[in-house]
Image (cartoon, helix red, strand yellow):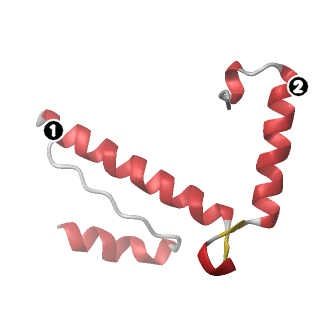
Amino acid sequence: MVKPLESADENTAKKQSDWLQELKATGILGRGGEKIQFSRVEVQEKHRALEEWVEAVNSLKDYGEWRSDISFNIADVDGIIDKYT
């Protein structure tokens, strides 16, 4: 069983931290042996969480209509804003 780092004892937290660092360094092997970079997995999880959050806020109907988009390039911001206006 994996405990969240906040609730883990010091020894368990150290092991989990070491394991996470190893995953970040080595990546994860996917089907066919291709390497999946750990940072890509993190981004996918964060994107999914963002989509759920926007859906929840929109379901309240008290805060207008929220939308989300992700870019790793600051130059994309104007185009993203234009897409939704």
Give x and y (percent) for residue 8.
Answer: 74, 22
How crowded pointer 2 is (Cα within 10 Å; few <14, some 14-19, many 20+) is rated as few
Q: Vertical placement of 35 versus 70: above or below? A: below
Rendered-image quadrant of the N terminus? top right
Q: Is residue 28 left or right of residue 48?
A: right
- The residue lying at 49 percent from left, 52 percent from top is 46
Give x and y (percent) for residue 18.
Answer: 85, 44
Quarter where residue 57 is shown: top left
Could you tell me which secondary element the residue under label 1 belongs to? helix
Give x and y (percent) for residue 3.
Answer: 67, 27
Residue 59, labelled with which disc? 1
- Mark 1 or 2 closer to N-term? 2
- The residue lying at 49 percent from left, 53 percent from top is 45
Could you tell me which secondary element the residue under label 2 belongs to? helix
| Residue type for callout 2 | Asn
| Residue type for callout 1 | Ser
- The residue lying at 81 percent from left, 19 percent from top is 9
- The residue lying at 54 percent from left, 59 percent from top is 43
Front residue of this view, candidates 84 and 12: 12
Question: Label 2: which residue?
Answer: 11
